[in-house]
Amino acid sequence: MVELNLRREFNRRAGKLDKFVHGMGSSPKGLPMSRFMRTFLVGAGFLIMASLVFAWSSTGVHRTGVPLSEGARVQPGRGRNLKRGSENLALRGGGSGGEVPDAQQRQSGLAKSQLDVVVDAMGASDADSAVSMLNEKFSDMVALEQPGAILKWAGETFPKKRWAQITSFGLSGLVITDMLAKMKLLGDMHVVTIDTLHLFPETYKLISEVHDYWEDLEDIKLYHCKRAETRRQFERMYGARLWQADAALYGYLTKIEPTKRALDELGVIAWLTGRRRSQGGERSELNLFEIDAGDGRLKINPLANWGREEVWRYIKKNAIPYNALHDQGYLSVGDTVSTEKAAESEGERGGRWRGSNNTECGIHHHTSASDSEGLAQKAERIRQGYAWEQRALERAREQGVTQVTQDNFVAEVAESDTAVLLDIYVPWCPHCRQFEPKFNEIAQVFAKQGGGGEGGKLSRHVAR
């Protein structure tokens, strides 16, 4: 927390300030500021902002798209299904197709006994041994034959509606869904997709297209952030740049928590992914079968040993609809905030989270129960902070204070030719919130004395 002594600055310079910014930079009228000094203060301000956000995040406290249906409303915490032949989302609860683990199991992860069906099918002594046997059995097959054989085994092994495909309808996921449709297995399982609320318009369009493409795909269960139904709501609750300020928390809210909730509510004991070794990064050593370290469920990667060429060949041969962004230079498609075009030499996932060390989708990151609890608590603190800010901004506007954000900071502060008085705050900082009445009091005095008069204005900055 950085607090300038506004009262002392006010007493010393009140008669000379003609622009008041609750934000960044300070230059009393009559004291010329060199370009170097202005640049220094601006740079220092940004560094302080970054330090504030990082320091707070590290204490343990983490679209350019359009919704599938603008008028659709989904109850928080529930799934929503696309219904064939309808342009709108038909509401249905994300209930289970079988016995759901009790509350204690949902807290700590899937009970080992839930995988007894796999153990029995393989004649193994325990789940780990069964997974080893499965990997050995199917790895002996030719790579092109592995997916079909694995899906056939899954359909014969798992009880109806106790297994699922979780897909973002990327190329690999489309291949798997098509194979399931051809094998008449879609009615025996769930198809789930996670709406991060930050998807591309082309992705939302594809979801509608694939729903109509496969006749047996009666519904797609779509889950999203528990507290928000649109990107606008999400940003009002957690800030417009959470993905940048705290990637871990962003991933938890938009991917990890919705995925875990879907698996729990649907009573899933095993799920299919579209990950492949050829995608590189953490996936380069991927097995066909694995037990999720976070909750003990069985994860199946039918295309683990396929290359990008085999995937595209299948897509083209079967005329499967795919994301139009692939024809525009996007090798892999995720969120708008983390996806860029990439050259072939960068690898399939070279355009995802460029500049970071992140090579894996948050859905597949191991998150312990304690980590999830910590992230949930941090998210709630941030949400409460932004809820407070909405009211605080209304009170500030009553004093004639204009908000300064990262978007207009350069114009309002860095390029300002009038005096600037600096204060930095973050909405979820309790000390910053306590200081708000004093700031508004000072702003009111400035307004009465002409601080916001001709050539200047009262402004306010938020470190997001």
Image (tube, rainbow, N blue to C red):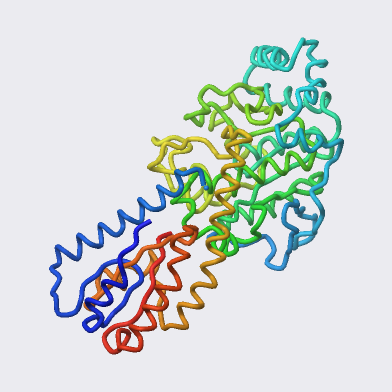
Answer above or below: position of 203 versus 216. Answer: below
Does residue 455 appear left or right of residue 258 in this picture? left
Answer above or below: position of 213 versus 427. Answer: above
Q: Splitting the image into 4 quarters, where does residue 271 fall?
A: top right
Q: Splitting the image into 4 quarters, where does residue 68 fall?
A: bottom right
The answer to whether residue 437 is seen in the rendering is yes
Answer above or below: position of 343 versus 297. Answer: below
Query: Viewer-proximal residue, 427 or 180?
Result: 427
Relative image position of residue 382 (x, y in whole percent)? 53, 56
Relative image position of residue 324 (x, y in whole percent)? 56, 51
Quadrant where the C terminus is found in the figure:
bottom left
Q: Residue at x 75, y 14 (%)?
A: 126
Q: Residue at x 64, y 44 (%)?
A: 257
Q: Splitting the image into 4 quarters, where does residue 267 fall?
A: top right
Relative image position of residue 297 (x, y in whole percent)? 71, 28
Query: Viewer-proximal residue, 49 or 406?
Result: 49
Quadrant where the N terminus is found in the figure:
bottom left
Does residue 96 appear left or right of residue 403 in this picture? right
Query: Viewer-proximal residue, 128 or 276?
Result: 128
Relative image position of residue 156 (x, y in whole percent)? 83, 24
The answer to whether residue 212 is seen in the rendering is no
Number of numbered discs overlaid on the protein picture: 0
